[in-house]
Image (cartoon, rainbow, N blue to C red):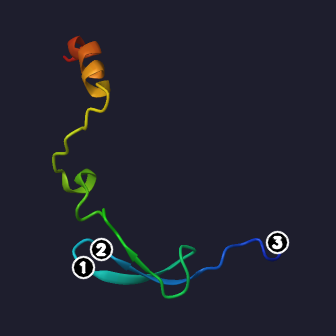
């Protein structure tokens, strides 16, 4: 293994969206850094099953829906 090519591995604190926090080892930041999450498994629709609206920027979503509207079973 080559010397001095690996990132420093240290302890950081992760703060979830509901305020709970835990400590873990990471290469992010520096020793004792705090990572405040904006999205986590407790709030993200992929894990909670919530409904999320797609933003139609430049008509891409509308164009896609129009193109494939007849494919549904």
Mark 2 = which residue?
A: 16
Q: Residues within 10 Å of mark 3 (few under 14, many from 20)?
A: few
Q: Are marks 2 and 3 in contact (CB under 8 Å)?
A: no
Residue 56 position (above or below residue 43)? above
Q: Which residue is mark 3?
A: 1
Residue 62, horizontal then vertical, whole percent = 24, 23
Report the mark closest to the observer, 3 or 1.
Answer: 1
> Do labels 3 and 1 touch, CB within 8 Å?
no
Badge 1: few (under 14), some or many (20 or more) residues near its Cα, within 10 Å? few
Relative placement, left or right, of 59 versus 14 is: left
Name the quadrant containing residue 7.
bottom right
The part of the image, by quadrant, that contains residue 19 is: bottom left
Looking at the image, is 23 positioned above or below residue 7? below
Quadrant in which the C terminus is drawn = top left
SS of the residue at dot 2? loop
Mark 1 element type: loop
Q: Residue at x 24, y 15 (%)?
A: 66
Q: Position of residue 12 (x, y in %)?
A: 47, 83
The image shows residue 44, relative to residue 70, as above or below, that is below
Q: Residue placed at 20% from the left, 56% from the top?
A: 48
Q: Nearer the viewer, residue 19 or 59?
A: 59
Task: Give the image quarter of residue 68.
Answer: top left
The label on residue 19 is 1
The residues bearing labels 2 and 3 have C-alpha atoms spaced at a distance of 36 Å
């Amino acid at each position: 293994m080559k010397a001095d090519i690996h990132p420093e591995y240290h302890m950081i604190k992760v703060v979830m969206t509901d305020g709970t926090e835990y400590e873990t080892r990471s290469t992010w930041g520096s020793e004792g850094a705090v990572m405040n999450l904006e999205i986590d498994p407790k709030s993200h629709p992929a894990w909670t099953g919530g409904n999320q609206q797609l933003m139609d920027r430049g008509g891409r979503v509308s164009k896609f829906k129009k193109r494939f509207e007849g494919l549904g079973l």
